Amino acid sequence: MKNLLGFGLIGVVSASLMGVQLWVAEEPAQSQPVTSPTTDLSVREWQESERLRESQRAQSVIQQELEMRKTVQDEVDRAFNRTTTLLNFLLGTLTILPIIATVLLYLSRQRAIQALREQIEEQIQKEIETQVKADLKQQSLLFQQQMMELQQQSLLAKDQMQQQAATFQEEIDQLKIEFDAELEKLKNTTTEIEREKSRIIQEITSITLVSTSKDVLSPEKQRQIQTLTQQLDDLKSKSPSLDLEINDFIREGDALFFEGRYQEAIASYDQAINKAMSENTNLFTAWHGKTKALRRLKQYAQALDANTKAMMLKPNDPLMWFERGYLLQLQGQYAEALDAYDKVITAKPGYHRARNHRGYILLKLQQYEEAIVELNKGIELKPDYGNGYYGKAYYYLLHHQTDLALDNLKTAISFYPGYKTLAKADPDFASLWKNDRFQTIVGSA
């Protein structure tokens, strides 16, 4: 293609040049004028004139030749430009054609690969379906065989279960009979435990209620209380689920109090208080018992706090006012104690213990005349109560009447032997500790 274009371009240029030469060769013949040697001009002039014309013709020819060359050059340029444009187009076309061919080849290859893949996948799918159908068929046969075996086993198991159920039912019936017997036995045991608990609590109550106002028991009652608390402890250990009522805990606390087991008594009172709080019942008795136990442990501040809680439930109870006065007395708060004893006597004028304690407080406040009147009033109300005589012994000792003091101390001890131990440690009687008669009195039976 490139050779053909080159030959065509050369032919065009050659033809143009040949045309120019022919045109130049013909031009002089057409433009030569007819001259005659017979003219009047001289030969010289004629020759000059000819040379001038020749020169003009030559310039004209040259000018025409230049124009022709320019024309030819323009034609050549135009032809070259057209040829170049065509050549560029052909070159671009030749450049693009391999790319297009490559793309078409790639697309054709991809289509071929896709078709091959589809054929392979179709073939594989058919083989898989065939294999799956074969496997399903095999599994179906195995499943049917297993189902037949399971049915046979189920029938066998059913027979065994029926036999076991019958045996199990017999065992259940036997266990039910045994359970009913044990339940009846347990009911009887529980009833017996409750009956025993009620008996113990009732006996404790009969002993402690009589002695609560004194806070002391006779040796015989003390032994009975000890026996009863031991029986209650044994009963609780044998039956951990034994349910004690609020009153049971209070009576247990009272028994432990009289036995001198004050810390355990407080624990019982606290159980009564907690149970009473959950059941929203009166806590007065429990707080009162806890007050006395704390006093015996000499925990006076805690005892006064428990007394306050009890008095919130019974603000006008004379016994609680007496207990409060005694706690204040033990802490040396004599003026406050006297006010408490006054409230007791106002509410209960015949309460001899309040009279005796009030007389002792008046001695501490150095109101001696009023004190001896109060002590005598207490002895008048209960002549066999040793506390009044003990107070009078202190009164006579303060007045330096040693014999009268020892006489009243001896009388007090005769009613309550515990005063022998108390007098040996009471700083109120420190001046008598080296007295021979005092030693005889507190050392005698």
Image: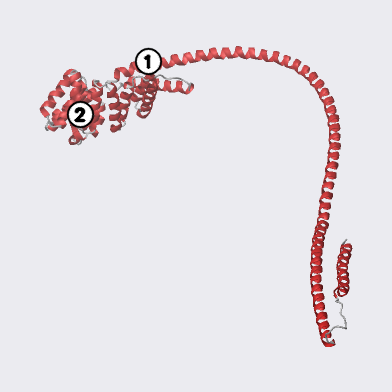
The percent coordinates of residue 268 (x first, y second) are 38, 25
358 vs 70, nearest the viewer: 70
| Left or right of residue 176, residue 325 in this image | left
Asked whether the residues under the numbered discs 1 and 2 touch, taking CB atoms below 8 Å apart as contact, a structural biologist would say no
Q: Quadrant of residue 172?
A: top right
417 vs 212, nearest the viewer: 212
| Left or right of residue 374, residue 240 in this image | right
- 19 to 353, vertically: above or below: below
SS type, badge 2: helix
Q: Which residue is mark 1?
A: 202
- 400 to 255, vertically: above or below: below
11 vs 148, nearest the viewer: 11
Q: Quadrant of residue 51?
A: bottom right
Give the residue type at disc 2: Ala
Q: How many marks?
A: 2
**Residue at 20%, 29% in the rendered image:** 337
355 vs 305, nearest the viewer: 305
Q: Which residue is mark 2?
A: 337
Res 228 visible: yes
Q: Residues within 10 Å of mark 1 (few under 14, many from 20)?
A: some
The percent coordinates of residue 61 (x first, y second) are 82, 75
Q: Residue furthest left?
A: 369
- 258 to 9, vertically: above or below: above
- 443 to 176, vertically: above or below: below
Give the residue type at disc 1: Gln
The percent coordinates of residue 392 (x first, y second) are 16, 27
Query: In the rendered image, which quarter contains the C terminus?
Result: top left
Q: CA distance from mark 1 to mark 2?
A: 35 Å
Q: Quadrant of residue 282?
A: top left
